[in-house]
Image: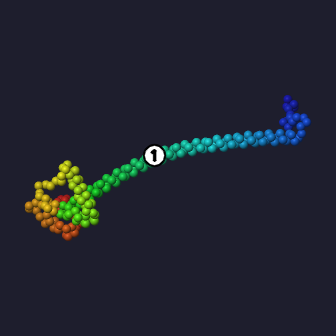
Amino acid sequence: MDENRRPRAARVRRGSSPEVAARLQRSRRRALDHRAAVREREKIVTAAVRDYINAWHAIGLVQQRRDTDIDDLKRRIQDVTVGAANEIADHEQAQAAAAAAIQEQGHTDNEIAELLEISTKRARQLVSASGRTEAAKTGNSQPDTDSEQVGASGVHESEDSDPLGETGRTRELGHGARKGTMPARERPD
């Protein structure tokens, strides 16, 4: 049987010229090249689609991670903001207590403002805030006045006490008093 088989080139019809045979061979070669190119393009397109889908999935993961990180940062910002507000409130209470302590030594709002280098309005706010804080601590709506009489200067005076004799300070801060010293009744024993 193998003997009866002819090679492809031999299948060319009788009477056809070598030019027709060459043209047919070139056509077959172009068809094969075209199919190879199509298969190569399909491979490239398939790989590109795979790359696109992988990138799409990666983008989704990055967006999720971004959103989670942003939520975490927002929570941290809120925690820092609340923490700072609490610290500021504590320091403002300390400022108010300091202004009230100065007022208890007989200084006016204007003098407190001058000593603290703040506006008179701010000095009043601090003294008022100190009164509100004290009232909130004791549960009363008015500051506690003890049984002592409150003098015209706002300093507690009793009949047998000398408000300045015990400490040796004058009413003006800076004349014999040191900054940072506590009044005698506020000193720890």
How many numbered circles does the render carry? 1
In x, y percent, where is residue 39? 70, 40
Q: Outermost residue, right direction?
A: 15
In the picture shown, does residue 8 fall above or below 166? above
Where is the C terminus found, in terms of image quarters? bottom left
In x, y percent, where is residue 44? 66, 43
Q: Outermost residue, bottom direction?
A: 175
Secondary structure of the residue carrying tag 1 is: helix
For image coordinates 63% across by 44% down, the residue present is 48
Q: Which residue is mark 1?
A: 68
For image coordinates 74% across by 41% down, the residue present is 34
In x, y percent, where is residue 93? 26, 56
For image coordinates 28% across by 65% down, the residue present is 117
Three-letter code, disc 1? Thr
Rendering quarter of residue 57: top right
Which is more toward the observer, 187 or 179?
A: 179
Q: Outermost residue, left direction?
A: 159
In the picture shown, does residue 144 fall above or below 107? above
Which is more toward the observer, 86 or 126?
A: 126
Would residue 159 appear left or right of 28 to someone viewing this image?
left
Asked if one can make out residue 30 in the rendered structure from this viewpoint, the answer is: yes
Rendering quarter of residue 131: bottom left
